[in-house]
Amino acid sequence: MKLIFEKSIKGRVGYSLPADRIEEIRVEDCIPPYARGRKKDLIEASEVDVVRHFTQLSKFNYGIEDGLYPLGSCTMKYNPKVNEHLAGLGNFANAHPFAPADTVQGCLKLMHDLSVLLCRITGMDAYTLAPAAGAHGELAGILIIRKYFEDRGEQRSKMLVPDSAHGTNPASSAMAGFKVVELKSNKSGTVDIGELERLMDEDTAGMMLTNPNTVGLFDGRIDEIAKIVHGKGGLLYYDGANLNATLGILRPGDTGFDIVHLNLHKTFATPHGGGGPGAGPVGVKKFLSPYLPSPVVVFNGENYRLRDPGEKSIGMMRAFWSNFSVLIKAYAWILSLGGKGLREVSEASVINANYVLVKLKDYYRPSYDRFCAHECVLTGRDYKKLGVKTMDIAKRLMDYGYYPPTIYFPHFKPYAEETMMVEPCESEGKEVLDDFIAVMIKISEEARSNPELLRDAPHRTRIRRTDDVLAIRRPILHYDDELRLKDELNYRPEDINF
Ligand SMILES: *Cc1c(COP(=O)(O)O)cnc(C)c1O
């Protein structure tokens, strides 16, 4: 398929206007000066050319509306359409961030009520809805921790992060100025209490933790962990990007956590992937609320207002107030399910993951045998000696029309070998899981009988096996890069035809 730039035909337009009534302006004059050098990139095409181009492209894609998307740790669940409808209502969609508070009381009420609901769901006392993603929420949260200690005149330079943590945890801690200290997991993949006792000291600001952790294991010793961290004056941060196992069952605020971020674009069913938009609200216990970013929504019994939390605030995390449309969808999702429904979400997601685990554990031996939470970790280690890697199994799944699970994560012991992390989510029915399970079993048979077939899979997709190293080393981020690289790469775009 050609790039849209290559489909451009000189003089072709995508509009028609009454020439006698509208003054003609040169396109060049509409381009801001800093972008004028790129004028050559403007596409000349008709409306039907453009619509067809992007419709075709969208069909090459795979999304949650095509089928199961078992990408562990990413919570790719189905996003009900009623939420989209509500977010698209004119009074929401057309509200301007600078509109006077009196004219957008409904929007502010929604933000306020969503904060209250998130407090109830997580057991926290106050929320900011500003952060635009999980990692952005982590950064806000860690900056809050830093400000808290600065305010108390305490110098603390380190942050504890378990080796099972999502990669964004050490990154956020480092960005907020902390030295990251890795905490090794014990043999069963949870926090090693002895290690924690040894490493937690008065120079450590706290610990970032996920429970159930990133490999879907619940750490039952959370009380002990909280006691050790708090005992040295530290704070306990909960990475709640993935609350899919605990909604209505366990609240981080009740188990000793001081601060938590959520990913509305995972657990709370707002669409994600492909770069956004997301929302990563941060909830805190009361003693941390003065440090929340600006602004916060307050209600005085009569009116809703946006207010700066005061001089202790870490300041603004972004322009304007939030990715507001994401908040609407999450709010609608919560209200459509109710408390009981939220609990059922977690029960179903845990049952679904354990169903897959039990059905596949004889074919893709897990590192050890125990129940999981909302996702299960299988391995392809038995096929390694046949020359088949987990990467090959994942690629072969694409031939059967599935999005592959997360692979080679977790990468810490005892999981280290050939892992694949499957998160089915609550929105899948039994027949979908049964089909996926049957395909996985079929692939395990292929790995034994015809390993060659897997080694260069996929065979039926539009793009065959890609060169992952080249894709990372030489990403094509702009059409100009593509032009520049044309001579260096094996193929030119026009060579790639199907
Ligand atoms: C996805 C995820 C994050 C990061 O969230 P983004 O919105 O992608 O920045 C952080 N922690 C965990 C456990 C996650 O699963």
Image: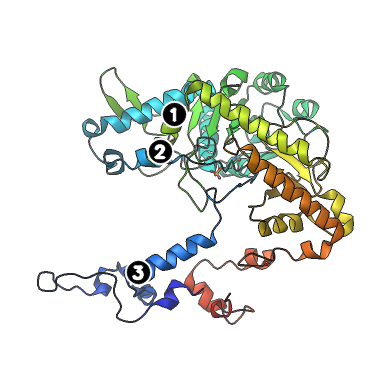
> 298 and 92: which one is in front?
92
Q: Is residue 365 left or right of residue 252?
A: right
Q: Are marks 2 and 1 in contact (CB under 8 Å)?
A: yes
Task: Count residues near mark 2 (Cα–Cα under 10 Å), then give few for <14, some for 14-19, many for 20+.
Answer: few
User: CB of mark 3 within 8 Å of CB of mark 1?
Assistant: no
C-alpha span from label 2 to label 1: 9 Å
The answer to whether residue 408 is left or right of residue 289 is right
The answer to which of 128 and 382 lies nearer the viewer is 382
| Residue receiving disc 3 | 48
Quarter holding the C terminus is bottom right
- Please indicate, yes or no, whether residue 28 appears anywhere in the rendered image: yes
**Which labelled disc corresponds to residue 82?**
2
**Looking at the image, is mark 3 or mark 1 earlier in the sequence?**
3
Amino acid type for the residue under numbered disc 2: Val
Looking at the rendered structure, the kind of residue marked 3 is Val
Dot 3 surroundings within 10 Å: few (below 14), some, or many (20 or more)? few
Q: Is residue 157 left or right of residue 16?
A: right
Q: Secondary structure at mark 1?
A: helix
Residue 360, placed above or below residue 469: above
What SS does tag 3 mark?
helix
The residue to which callout 1 is attached is 336
Q: Position of residue 410 (x, y in %)?
A: 73, 44
Across and down, in percent, residue 486 comes to: 56, 79
